[in-house]
Image (cartoon, grey):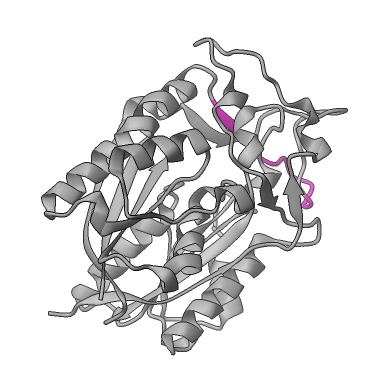
Amino acid sequence: MTDPGITGTGYAVPKRVRDNTDPVYAALDRTPGPGGVAEADLFTGAAQRRVLDADEEIEAFMVDACQQALDEAGIDAADVDRLYGYASVPAYYTPNSLYEVHARLGMREDSLVVPLNSDFSNFLLGLVHSHEAIVAGGCTHALVVTGSNWTRHVDYRRGHAQAIGDGAGAAVLSTGGALRLVDHDTRTFGWAYTSMTMAVRPRHAVDWAGIPVGKDGNPAPTYLLESDSGVEVYQTIMRDGLPDLVGELLDRNGITGADVSLITHQGSRALLDHWSARLRPAAYLETLETFGNLTHSTYPVNLALHAGAVSTPYVVIAAVGTGFHVTAVLLRVT
């Protein structure tokens, strides 16, 4: 049977660094929410973030990450049969600029482009779909890429905006490879559908308030974590739903935390510390302090950055996402 795996990875982040003294954080609201907790106290741990300059777009970084992954895999863009992933936040509601990445890479016209609007598990679902497509004989090489430009789409009064950074990551899947997909699992909590949303809405800054406008002159969307339901999800599903799911995945495959290197969502040091205590991984691969929260690009960036140093027999990637859902994949190191 075909046994596909990850044969190449890559990542790209902007050169511009934003630290905690940046004036953009001057308007941070530290007022306790309905649950008595200040949102600003939940999202801590980032010392630096990478931020797009005014003349930069995330698609260029996605292309760069893809090219690194292709080079490492030893193939050309013309060899890729399927392109999975997502650029968030895209210039248009549709199409996603994953199609622009296809064009910039010079991919074939008959290659299938599949935008996956599942923030923040887009990369994980791309791995799963790529694996299934190769096993089924639908393609030989698949490329997965995500890019996040969320520093342009958050309200800097809100606590969750403290950690947000920009970046892109990619991976190639083909027969063979050093990381083989063994298993995956997910949990969906549809009752929390509106707890975290991206929509056109008013935004506030130190000396300005209103609906932001993009470079194209159109209203730009802003992310919102609801002060009641969003914080509840943070304190319940995110806090314990993720380690619960990963624990079940490990148990099902007869392994323990001591066998894995762990990559997770990285929006808060408190969450990372809690997940580490619950799962006790042999290694925790993260960049919260230096890159901040790269939202859906957290996973491919950390995989590419740390792949060469993995010393455990398995890697687990666990994502939380809007909607609300938790997804995890188990990779075997060969």
Does the magenta portion include 219?
yes
Residue 184 falls in image quadrant: bottom left
Residue 31 falls in image quadrant: top right
Establish if 5 lies above or below 37.
below
Does the magenta portion include 224?
yes
Establish if 331 lies above or below 50.
below
Establish if 19 lies above or below 84.
above
| Observer-nearest of 238 and 97 | 238
Can see residue 57?
yes
311 horizontally vs 45: left or right: left
Prevailing secondary structure class for the magenta stretch in the rendered image = loop
165 horizontally vs 206: left or right: left
Instruction: Give the residues drawn in magenta, as a range.
Output: 215-225
Residue at 44% of width from left, 40% of height from top? 272
- Return the x and y of residue 73 as percentages of the image width and height: 42, 84
Q: Quadrant of the C terminus?
A: bottom left
- Return the x and y of residue 70 as percentages of the image width and height: 48, 82
Residue at 31% of width from left, 77% of height from top? 178
- Return the x and y of residue 78 as percentages of the image width and height: 47, 87
| Observer-nearest of 263 and 59 | 263
Establish if 191 lies above or below 334.
above
40 horizontally vs 188: left or right: right
Q: Quadrant of the N terminus?
A: bottom left
Residue at 70% of width from left, 21% of height from top? 29
Residue at 84% of width from left, 28% of height from top? 206
